[in-house]
Image (cartoon, grey):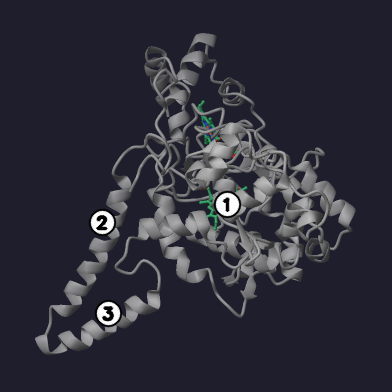
Amino acid sequence: MNSSLAGGSTRASRSAWVYSACVGAATAIVVACCAGSAANDAALEAVAAAQRDSRAVGSGGNLVEEGKRIFRDDTFGSEAFWGGQLALHRALAGSKKGGVGDGVSANQALKLGLKVDAERVPKAVADGIKSGTVDLDSADATLALLEAGAVVGVRGVFDGNHRLTSVGFTCALCHSTVDDSFAPGIGKRLDGWPNRDLNVGAIVASAPNLEPFTDMLQVDEATVKKVLNSWGPGKYDALLNLDGKGVRPDGKPAATLNPAAFGLAGVNQHTWTGSWGTVSYWNAYVANLQMHGKGNFYDARLDDAVKYPVAARNRLGHKHDDEDLITSKLPALHVYQLSLETPLPPEGAFDSEAASRGRTIFNTTAKCATCHVPPLFTEPGNNLHTAAEIGIDDFQSSRSPDGMYRTAPLRALWSTDKVHKGGFYHDGRFATLMDVVNHYNQHFKLNLSDAQQRDLVEYLKSL
Ligand code: HEC
Ligand code: HEC
């Protein structure tokens, strides 16, 4: 696959490996079961063909490519919710185009952190943007980009008269950004890079009908809007629909930073707190309960009415829609995410001599490698820790099934303008890597000198 699309300069070839390993395994099974009597060959082939058909996605095809398509463009039928129920498309279109209000201009959309895939911008529109004949301050420009499928993670549905009739979201909304090569916010896709500019709360809060949220959370519209607008850029709360906790005890929003969706192969627990399940669990969870796609989802842990009152009341752990547009896509989506590699630091991103001293400190004096085990930079095994172990509060960890934090796999720490924009740790509480190191220095009483701390930071920037 094109590694530049998978996230800048990457550690090449692992994606090819994932694909060939999967195909290889499938072939091995067929060969093994067909090795018996020749008379059974035809029957076995028929069974295998039927299985391939029922598996629907990726069978015999390229799971990575299929997963990429799903990740970028599949809404899982979520238009029925975002357009059908919330009427979000009407706010996007504006009253002149059959919607409500002024609509959202392309410049406003970019300010909300939405990104534009330059490769999908129609040539006439691209030329118009360059020459100034396409007015980025008009909602028409947004609609033209949407109709071309160029707004990353947002899929508009248009009728024969180019009217926007609905809208749905894809995974790329929060887990992709662009390289800004055409203009700020417009460029080549970087899949798996978190969008740390995206103000998803403000976008949802602008929907004409918030009743699905007021009904589910059993609070008034003003409260829903207040919570959504409190998140700010780069953050989202994927657990609000379970426990209804919109605010932390310290008054700050309960939302967490959008994490990277690359560098996850070999990592056991996922999400900031872990203990939900595999990447595939989380994909099913998000597609069903966050994106509001159509499908089946089961998790009896969500019946716990004390811990997850909203989920228990709404039986979110027992979702059975008439149509299932999610389950058949989970295999390819899983493989695609595991194929996304952590982008390497660009030339000059760190001081290599200092980094080499820092590496020794990381592995010895500072004890970082006891949890962040190279080269995964999280523990092989059950990579979870209590809040007390890492010296922070337990608000977010206590929202997860096991009440722990996951040892964040250290990925692309050099990228503070994109991947780690908004800070470090689940809520961005540490603005810089030096703040993180200071925290550990105090918490673990490491007695690192200033020079050692600086070297450690240079090493972190090399990861
Ligand atoms: C509205 C924004 C949003 C959308 C859309 C979204 N995610 Fe996420 N994703 C998040 C946030 C926020 C987290 C962290 C949640 C937590 O820790 O509680 C997350 C976590 C993850 C993780 C775990 C990353 C890690 O470091 O372990 C993966 C993998 C992931 N998402 C994949 C997906 C896929 C695949 C889709 C589409 C089916 C998707 N996400 C849709 C915001 C989003
Ligand atoms: C006891 C296990 C443990 C040790 C030891 C440890 N960490 Fe961590 N580290 C964690 C956990 C857990 C998190 C996730 C915290 C969160 O999500 O809020 C984390 C997060 C981080 C992050 C933020 C990553 C991100 O994506 O935001 C950095 C950077 C980091 N650690 C560096 C270090 C360094 C440097 C050391 C050594 C001085 C160290 N860690 C020692 C468990 C540990």
Q: Given this view, does label 1 or label 3 mark the residue nearer the observer?
A: 1
Local crowd size for mark 2, using a 10 Å CA cut-off: few (<14), some (14–19), many (≥20): some
Q: Given this view, does label 1 or label 2 mark the residue nearer the observer?
A: 1
Ligand 1 within 8 angstroms of badge 1 C-beta: yes
Ligand 1 within 8 angstroms of badge 3 C-beta: no
The residue at which mark 1 appears reads as 153
- What is the C-alpha distance between the residues marked 3 and 2? 19 Å
Q: Could you tell me residue 65's position as x and y percent?
A: 37, 56
Instruction: Kindly identify the residue that appears in the image at 61 percent across and 80 percent down.
Output: 322
Q: Secondary structure at mark 3?
A: helix
User: Who is closer to the viewer here, 131 or 179?
Assistant: 131
Ligand 1 within 8 angstroms of badge 2 C-beta: no
Q: Secondary structure at mark 1?
A: loop
Left or right placement of residue 16 versus residue 280 in this view: left
Q: Amino acid at mark 2?
A: Ser
First in residue order: circle 3 vs circle 2:
2
Quarter residue 433 falls in: top right
Q: Are marks 1 and 2 in contact (CB under 8 Å)?
A: no
The residue at which mark 3 appears reads as 48
Q: Secondary structure at mark 2?
A: helix
Q: Amino acid at mark 3?
A: Ala
Quarter residue 394 falls in: top right
Q: Are marks 1 and 3 in contact (CB under 8 Å)?
A: no
Tag on residue 20?
2
- What is the C-alpha distance between the residues marked 1 and 2? 28 Å
Left or right placement of residue 351 versus residue 167 in this view: left
Q: Amino acid at mark 1?
A: Gly
User: Who is closer to the viewer here, 117 or 456?
Assistant: 117
Instruction: Kindly identify the residue that appears in the image at 62 percent across and 39 percent down.
Output: 426
